[in-house]
Image (cartoon, rainbow, N blue to C red):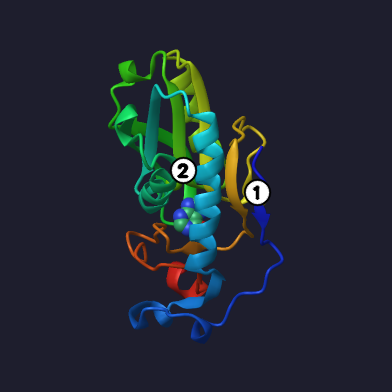
Amino acid sequence: MSHPIDVRNQQLYDLEQFAVPQAVKNDLQGILLPQGLIDNRVARMGEEIAKNYAYGNTLAICVLNGAQHFYQQLLNSVFPSVHNDIQLESIKCCSYDGTKSTGEVQINGLDFTAVRGKNVLVVEDIIDTGLTLSKLAQKLYEHDPLSLEIACLLDKRERRNPQATVKPEYTGFIIPDRFVVGYGLDFNGRYRLLPHLGVLKEEIYQK
Ligand code: HPA
Ligand code: MG
């Protein structure tokens, strides 16, 4: 359904080629996806989603914290005129601690009774092992949504766990197995406001 852009073999852009906040320059190896490219890809994903959700009765779930910026940008392009038809909710899935997935998932912040009979769209920033999202999708299915789809900005396919059952309907980019920050994604709470998607220096997350 979606045609993700595969940047697994793409060279990083030099930090001098784009406007990068001085405060984070020293911590990055380079830019993988410049802001303008992400924004337009997200707008395109929004067009696809808008077609499929034209009938309303939608519950759009933002998976905090990483997806917040993507969610905002996506909804701005999906539903410019029918914002009020959509129920917006945010949840927090706790499974990520620094750079290591633990496999344990706790889901907070959603009254699951809101799911019944809705066209549910889950908005996620990045899929790597896929285990968190698989567990979230299972849990949502238990509450009888009318439909359930997943929009994911980034897919780190190399890291997929074979036990992960989930397949996003909308994917922005397939990226290499490197630690990325920016466009809402963080490392221990930092770098979320970087407008581009950058690759973090290994010395930063291996400290
Ligand atoms: N960066 C930030 N958060 C993440 C990543 C990443 O590369 N992979 C999974 N969660
Ligand atoms: Mg996430």
Q: Is mark 2 within 8 Å of ligand 2?
A: yes
* Circle 1 residues within 10 Å: few <14, some 14–19, many ≥20: some
- Which mark is first along the chain, 2 or 1? 2
Please tell me which residue lies in front, 191 or 50: 50
Q: Is residue 99 visible?
A: no
**Image quadrant containing the C terminus:** bottom left
47 or 159, which lies in front?
A: 47
Q: What residue is at 40 percent from the left and 46 percent from the top?
A: 71
Residue type highlighted by circle 1: Arg
Q: Which residue is mark 2?
A: 124
In the picture, the quarter occupied by the N terminus is: top right
The residue at the point 32 percent across, 19 percent down is 114
Nearer to us of marks 1 and 2 is 2
Residue 186, by quadrant, is bottom left
- Mark 2 surroundings within 10 Å by alpha-carbon count, few (fewer than 14), some (14 through 19), many (20 or more): many
Q: Is residue 13 left or right of residue 23?
A: right
Q: Compute the Cα span from label 1 to label 2.
A: 15 Å
The image quadrant that residue 86 belongs to is: top left
* Residue 77 position in % (x across, y down): 43, 47
Instruction: Tell me what residue is drawn at x 62 percent, y 59 percent.
Output: 177
Dot 1: what SS?
helix
Q: Nearer the viewer, residue 44 or 8?
A: 44
Examine the image and state in which quarter residue 92 appears: top left
Vertical side of 75 occupied by 197: above or below: below
Query: Which dot marks residue 157?
Result: 1
**Residue found farthest to the right:** 9
